[in-house]
Image (spheres, grey):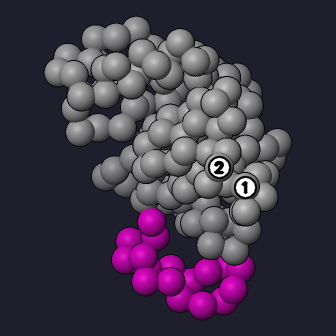
Amino acid sequence: MTGFLCATCGQTHDSIPMCLGAPAPELWFSIPEAEREARAELSSDQCVIDGQHFFILGRILLPVVDGDDSFVWLAWVSLSEANFMRSCELWESEGREAEPAFFGWLQSALPGYAPGTLSLKTNVQTMPLGQRPLITLEPTDHPLAMEQREGITMARVQQIAEAAFHG
């Protein structure tokens, strides 16, 4: 699908994005802008806040049942300090995908979900070099966990895009 008529704004958007995400963990947004540089270290893949909150960016894959690719949420997960340090040790290591998954809490408020997505239980699997970690949600009845297990349609991808663009 190349474009779509947005039900929210009535405009035509050029394409439906198959990957969306948050630029930082939710906690980062609660820090006053003037304090962020002193209190937080944020890169494209990792974040440490106040030296006691540790986050990595990973991928939540939602199979698209009537499409060729999965929809990808880029999402932040909090890890224990020990697991965060271990993931840092393995960051550039060949074979790192053999490491057992890390337990984490989802720390991205993804648009279009009720109830919200903050603090859902996850497992984070390190992937081969060049790939972001894979996030698997605990198999609950939360809509995001159900979508990860059962898949979504392109119409749902469009709803997600509308919520992300105008939420």
Total labels: the figure holds: 2
> Where 36 sits versus 25, above or below?
below
Residues at discs 2 and 1 in contact (Cβ within 8 Å): yes
* Residue name at image x 61 percent, y 54 percent: 37
Task: Farthest residue to the bottom: give it.
Answer: 11
> Where 91 sits versus 115, above or below?
above
> Where 163 sits versus 84, above or below?
below
Q: Quadrant of residue 89?
A: top left
Which residue in the structure is indicated by mark 2? 38
Which residue in the structure is indicated by mark 1? 35
Q: Bounds of the magenta span?
A: 1-17
Secondary structure under tag 2 reads helix
Residue 61 visible here:
no
Quarter of the image that includes the C terminus: bottom right
Residue 52, percent from left and from top: 67, 27
Task: Farthest residue to the left: give it.
Answer: 94
Residue 91 visible here:
yes
At label 1, the amino acid type is Glu
Tag shown at residue 78:
none
Quarter of the image that includes the N terminus: bottom left
> Where 34 sits versus 60, above or below?
below
* Residue name at image x 53 percent, y 12 percent: 82
